[in-house]
Image: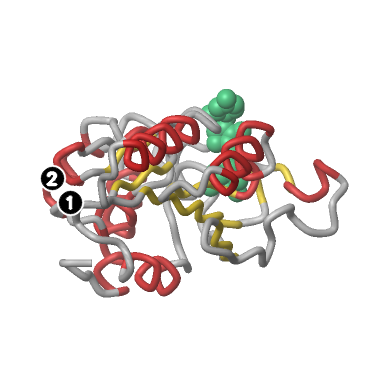
Amino acid sequence: MFLMLKKKDLISFENKIANLFNKAKIKAPIHLHSNNEDQLIKIFKQIKKKDWIFCSWRSHYHCLLKGVPQKTLEKEILQGKSISLCFPEYNIYSSAIVGGILPIAVGMALSFKIKKIKKKVYCFIGDMTSETGIAHECIKFSINKKLPIKFIIEDNSKSVCTDTKKTWSQKKLTYENFSTKYVYYYKYHLKYPHAGAGKRVQF
Ligand SMILES: Cc1ncc(C[n+]2csc(CCOP(=O)(O)OP(=O)(O)O)c2C)c(N)n1
Ligand SMILES: [Mg+2]
């Protein structure tokens, strides 16, 4: 990537947002990341400025690594937009609807292929999202049509407060350790609750 932030920059940004949330300076939900800085920095090394990123409600780190300036991102979060951050000028789009971004990401990759545009789509999804029907269809379609897209599964083992594997009675997630050209899986431990910063409002 053209601009590479360090692990400590990501952590200090997320800590700052957590403090602002706990001081009631942010009136809308926030979904923080933690303990996945190394993995994301490594993934973003292969992502180019012209490529597109699609992600979920948990996207502060992705925005920073795609080049959104910290001040710009903080302003949007303070305005209550953390849950669905979109910065088209930095080629990053997110949705707070579970599975919502998947067909949009696939549609963009299909369009790149049809128009012979040399850009790639990176679609970041949580472990529970990766087990939905829409994810299975989108991943299958993309692999079979050889689309310029990669799905990155970010496994924190839970969906809000529910254990993902227990929900589906699976010993392993469908795409666990399934690293191919189209799918990359990584596991991390989220120190924060699903939403909020551990002190004030919880979901
Ligand atoms: C269609 C839909 N159903 C339910 C929700 C509520 N919801 C928000 S995040 C979430 C958990 C998803 O878990 P996962 O994909 O593992 O992502 P994580 O939050 O753990 O990163 C749920 C159920 C939603 N936003 N959209
Ligand atoms: Mg999860």
Mark 1: which secondary structure? loop
Q: In which quadrant will I find the C terminus?
A: top right
Q: Which residue was labeled with disc 2?
A: 72
Q: Residue furthest right?
A: 169
Residue at left offset 22%, top offset 70%? 5
Where 101 falls versus 90 (above or below)? above
Residue at left offset 35%, top offset 30%? 28
Give the numbered dot on residue 37.
Answer: none
Q: Nearer the viewer, residue 39 or 123?
A: 123
The percent coordinates of residue 114 (x first, y second) are 35, 37
Residue type, mark 1 in image: Val
Residue at left offset 57%, top offset 37%? 138
Mark yes or no: residue 203 visible.
no
Where 134 falls versus 176 (above or below)? above
Q: Nearer the viewer, residue 78 or 163?
A: 163
The percent coordinates of residue 80 (x first, y second) are 28, 31
Q: Are marks 1 and 2 in contact (CB under 8 Å)?
A: yes
Say which of marks 1 and 2 sits in front. Answer: 1
User: Please, which colouring scheme is shown?
Assistant: secondary structure
Where 16 falls versus 37 (above or below)? above
